[in-house]
Amino acid sequence: MNRAQRQLSEGILMTDQYQLTMAQLYFRQGLHTMPAQFDYFYRKNPSYGSHQAGYTILAGTGSLLQWMTEERFTADEIACLRRQTGRSGTPLFREDFLDWLLQEGNFAQIRIDGLQEGRVAHPTVPLLTVRGPFAMAQILETPLLNHMNFQTLIATKASRMRQAAGGRPILEFGLRRAQGYGGNPGVRGALIGGADASSNVGISHALGFDPKGTHAHSMVQAFAALGSGELGAFRAYAEIYPDDCLLLVDTINTLESGIPNAIRVFEELRARGHRPVGIRLDSGDLAYLTLKAAQALNGAGFADTTIVLSNQLDEMVIWQILSQIRAEAPKLGLEPEALIRRLVFGVGTALITSQGAAALDGVYKLTAVKDKGQWLPAIKISETPGKTINPGAKQTWRLYDQRDRAVCDVLAMEDEELDKMAELQLHHPVDSHVQRTLRREELSRVERLRVALPHGPDAPPEETIAEMRLRRDQDLEHLDDGVKRMVNPHLYHVSLTRRLWELKQRLVRERSFPRSKSNTP
């Protein structure tokens, strides 16, 4: 695609066809300006096969709000829609609808409330609530899901990798393996969730980060082919980057060639008054090679140099590497925690593709419409009880126990003030037999989660990723260790207040078709 085509595909037409056909139906029925409410939530935490997430990190809101501010229907988009025809050959979209889109087709009247970016999130909890004119709120569905689902998925994977690494730096290296231009929002999600930096130059600069990277095997191969060898390649790199010298040492033979040659170049740098950064290991048994590299570097007086590990890392591989180092380092005369503090992890495919969990099952469901000044609850009923949505205008709360650990998220009616209640009667979202009562004195605090998330030219500046990371760290600190467990995490509870539970049950009874009685004896 050329630039114009790419801009068209990423603009306001980045939606599904049925959003537009429904919007025209609402327009023809006079419902297009009726206020509607949609909730964005996801149903299950990501599962990676042998290990699972017990939470997610919300990401994507800033990208979404900026997109909403900038996008609207213009003559170019209208021309595309005007060319569409139905099976009979007549225009699919009528001129009065297209005229309305040209005049009113923007998101200025849409209001979004929800959790702030970087917060820990849980299944079935409304993460964003969208209110606005029915037609435009409907058109927003697909781009909202596209922005939020992917970045939240990647942020969650990055958070798990950071946890596995014990807080050691995580560098995102995945652009070459990413799904097209999805690499850019993927980097944003990774930076929010747990990555410290990325090798992706463009998006790093756009987000205010310095990109990270050194050299590839091809540089060493080229010097070897030209007769200068690995040592010549390392010397050339050190000459250009004497204060940023980090060398990839596994092109030929890590232990017999790469590390000895790196140490020789480091000694030359030190003699000239420079401090080498370290080495990168990109193949082989990374735990074993890390131990041997540390021995050699320490013996040469470079005990403070960094060791970057890369090559098909994910959270479980990182965890295994650190476990092996802790077990074997003392046998080699190495202090394991001192060695671990030198490590940096370069992660690529597993992070940018959320390897093992390809998508977050986030959904966008109509939960209320406003008629004659009153919000009327809407519900979708499913034969799978867990897919029956929680209806109506709601507020979301988080409860903390006496340890100040988050123990439950609660969905309540919008006018319920849980922080002022002496007693909370909570229901399981699906199982009518599971309920409990919590007294206020059993809790250290009750937090309202949903806040206004403004967009548009008058909105405050977009939050920095540093602010989102701080929010992430605070939420994770207050999350029980069992929920953060890498394998088989504890289930975090999400409950409904009694009023919301009773509303849901009433709507299910009213909207359900009676089962027909069989005439078979």
Image (cartoon, rainbow, N blue to C red):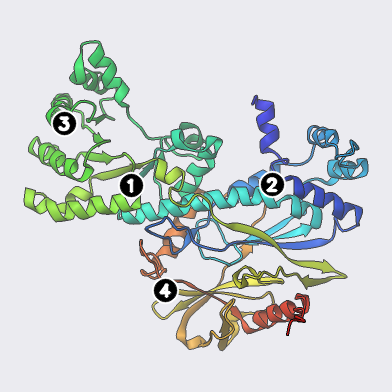
Residue 169 marker: 1
Q: Earlier in the sequence, mark 1 or mark 4?
A: 1
* Total count of labels: 4
Distance, label 1 to label 4, CA atoms, is 26 Å
Q: Quadrant of residue 17?
A: top right
Mark 3: amino acid: Ile
Q: Secondary structure at mark 1?
A: loop
Whichever of labels 1 and 2 marks the residue nearer the N terminus, that label is 2
- Report helix, strand or loop for mark 3: helix
Task: Work out how far the residue at label 1 is from the one at label 3, CA to CA, in angstroms.
Answer: 22 Å
Seen from the viewer's position, the closer of residues 321 and 198 is: 321
Residue 281 position in % (x across, y down): 25, 36
Crowding at label 4, few (<14), some or many (≥20) Cα neighbours within 10 Å? some
Q: Amino acid at mark 4?
A: Arg
The residue carrying mark 3 is: 259
Looking at the image, residue 469 lies above or below residue 494: above
Q: Is residue 119 above or below residue 142?
A: below
Residue 354 appears left or right of 318: right
Residue mark closest to the camera, 3 vs 4: 3
Left or right: where 307 falls relative to 171: left
Q: Residue at x 13, y 40 (%)?
A: 292
Circle 3: is it few (<14), some (14-19), or many (20+) Cα within 10 Å? many
**Residue type indicated by callout 1:** Pro
Residue 277 is situated, as x and y percent measured from the top left of the image, at 24, 34
Screen quadrant of the N terminus: top right
Q: Which residue is mark 4?
A: 405
User: Residue 68: which numbered mark, if any?
Assistant: 2
Q: Is residue 134 above or below residue 104?
A: below
Circle nearer the N terminus (2, 4): 2
Q: Does dot 2 land on a helix, a strand or a loop?
A: helix
Whichever of callouts 3 and 4 sits on the residue coming sooner in the sequence is: 3
